[in-house]
Image: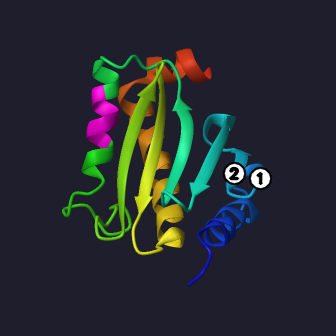
Amino acid sequence: MRNGVNSVREIVAAYADRGVFNGLNESRPGRFRFVWLLRHPMELNVDTVKQVLNFRQLLPGIPLRSALYDDVKWFLEQRHDASLPAHRRVDPRKAVLSCSNRNGRVSVSLLVKNNQYAYGANRIVNVVHELFQHLRDAYPEYLAENFGVSQE
C-alpha cells in the first residue's frame, strides 16, 4: 500500500510542473503551500490518520449564517451527484467532500476512502477550481472584496 502523503506529493508536484501551482513548498510532510487561483496563497494538508485532504481557510469573509455559505455547502454536496460527468464528480465510494466554517473562514475537506489519496488529490483540486469558477459567476462581489478580483 502506497503512502498517502507520497501519493498526494506526486499529484501536487505534477500540477506544479505543469505551471498550475506556483511556488510549491512542503513546509512539513503533508503540508503543501502554493500560489494558485487568483494568485492567492493556498495550503493543502494531508492527514493520513484521519484520512483527510484539506484546503484550510480557503475562503475568508463568509459568515456562518449566510446565503453564500449555504451556497458553498450546496455546491460541494452537488459534486457527488451521479448526473455529473465522471471527471467532475466525486465518487462517494472513494471520497466524501465537506466544508467547515470557523470565524468566517471556510475550509474544504475530502475524506479519502480505501487509501485513494491520488484520486482524492485530483478530485479536491478540481472541485476547488470549479468552486472558484462558481463564485466568479455567482458572487463576483465576494471575490472582489476578499481576493481583489476585478468585477469587469
- The image quadrant where one finds the N terminus is bottom right
Residue lying furthest bottom in this view? 1
Q: Which residue is mark 1?
A: 28
Q: State the SS at label 2.
A: strand
81, 102: nearer the viewer: 102
Residue 74 colored magenta? Answer: yes
Which residues, given as a range, are shown in magenta? 70-75
> Which amino acid is tagged 2?
Arg
* Residue 88 x %, y %: 36, 61
Tag of residue 61: none
* Residue 19 x %, y %: 73, 57
Label 1 packing within 10 angstroms: few (<14), some (14-19), many (20+) = few
Residue at x-position 56% and y-position 39%: 56
- The quadrant in which residue 148 appears is top right
Q: Is residue 150 visible?
A: no
**What number of labels is visible?**
2
Residue at x-position 48% and y-position 37%: 107
Tag of residue 31: 2
Residue lying furthest front in this view? 49
Residue at x-position 39% and y-position 16%: 63
- The quadrant in which residue 9 appears is bottom right
> Which amino acid is tagged 1?
Arg
Q: Does residue 121 lie above or below 149 as drawn?
A: below
* Residue 124 x %, y %: 48, 55
| C-alpha separation, residue under disc 1 versus residue under disc 2 | 5 Å
